Amino acid sequence: MSDSTTKTSPLHDKHVALGAKMADFGGWSMPIEYPGGGVVAEHTAVRERVGVFDVSHLGTATVTGPGAKDFLNSCLTNDLERIQAGKAQYTMCCDESGGVVDDLIAYLRGDDDVFLIPNAANNAEVVRRLTEAAPEGVTVQNVHGQHAILAVQGPRADEVVEAMGLPTGHEYMSFVDTQWQGHPLSVCRTGYTGEKGYELVCRVEDAPAVWDAVVEAMQPFDGLPCGLGSRDTLRTEMGYALHGNELSLDITPVMARTGWAVGWKKNSFWGKEALSAQREAKEGRLSNGLLVTGRGIPRAGQSVLDADGNQVGEVTSGTFSPTLKQGVALALLDRGVEEGTAVTIDVRGRAVEAEVKKPPFVEGGASS
């Protein structure tokens, strides 16, 4: 199941006891799905009721000291001046060419204290770049593996978190630092499913008890433990970018249509000159959604063809949508391929019909 270099979540034994199918995610052995319905059942639980994900493989880092916020604001794409203490912000770490080293969420505790959650595989590189650039007095610390993160997601998430005695009802993309049974825990109004939910960030040693409490609190609502397989189908239905697929060193925020997370008016951030030039030139492919109208499930790397059989793009993520009961995909397409255009996807040598459609493919309740 894992080799000696693979890391395990503090909830690993819980997953094994439940019979979860495990796989490697960014060097961590994590659950893909659980018995009793698998990805489709877990996906449906989140869309209609509630589910809990172990996402403790995600990276964590702190940036502290006088001027920590201003320093980060000169590095990352989004503008931390747009938010205040207690709020979270989606942002990106780019290189000088505009390529995306990682996308992450910054949690602003104050001008001198910012908590970061990058992706697992990129955490060390984000920390390295920030450490090299940090001015005297600002400390960047890699705390990956010191926290557990449980994502409680779905329309009944409020009731589950309330049943645990934790605060709820705060605004989307905000967080509350609190305590649970005498131990520190942050309740973050964030998630990656498109549904209303919370991410609970706690100490590693508290994770098993927090997991048990969530599972117990979900029972009245038929909630389910959910693996990263359903997390992927949920995020794809919403059109959320995944680093390595929709974002990479070769796929910029301009191409990925994540320019809304770029502070274009800021004096500086890593990659600003290159990204501004690309934005002005209006060149290069752009991310689009594809709704499959034929029979087939698209996968990353498959070609997208126009009516004349010419390649006009490539799928970056593709899956079967449990909600729509049909295939959906995200793809990089040539500029000029407009919404509503009929295309075909080369699915293992077979032409599968699809239509260009702006995501999300389903309606979510994340910001409600």
Image (cartoon, rainbow, N blue to C red):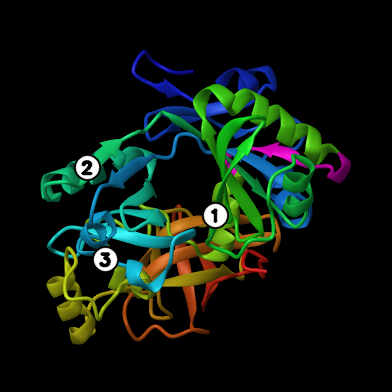
Magenta stretch: includes residue 228: yes
Residue 292: quarter of image? bottom right
Residue 21: quarter of image? top right
Residue at coordinates 54% horizontally, 34% vertically from top-left? 202
Q: Describe the element under mark 2 as helix, strand or loop.
A: strand
Magenta stretch: includes residue 112: no
- Residue 237 position, x and y percent, is 59, 62
The amino acid beneath tag 2 is Thr
Residue at coordinates 79% horizontally, 43% vertically from top-left? 163
Q: Earlier in the sequence, mark 1 or mark 2?
A: 2
Q: Describe the element under mark 3 as helix, strand or loop.
A: loop
Mark 3 crowdedness (10 Å alpha carbons): few <14, some 14-19, many ≥20: many
Q: Decide if residue 174 is on the left or right side of residue 255.
A: right
Q: Describe the element under mark 1 as helix, strand or loop.
A: strand
Residue at coordinates 15% horizontally, 80% vertically from top-left? 277
The residue where tag 1 is placed is: 175
* 3 vs 1, front mark: 1
Q: Which residue range is magenta in the image? A: 220-229
The residue where tag 3 is placed is: 252
The amino acid beneath tag 3 is Thr
Q: Decide if residue 302 is on the left or right side of residue 197.
A: left
The amino acid beneath tag 1 is Phe
The residue where tag 2 is placed is: 139
Label 3 to label 2: alpha-carbon separation:
28 Å
Q: Mark 3 and mark 1 in contact? Answer it, CB < 8 Å.
A: no
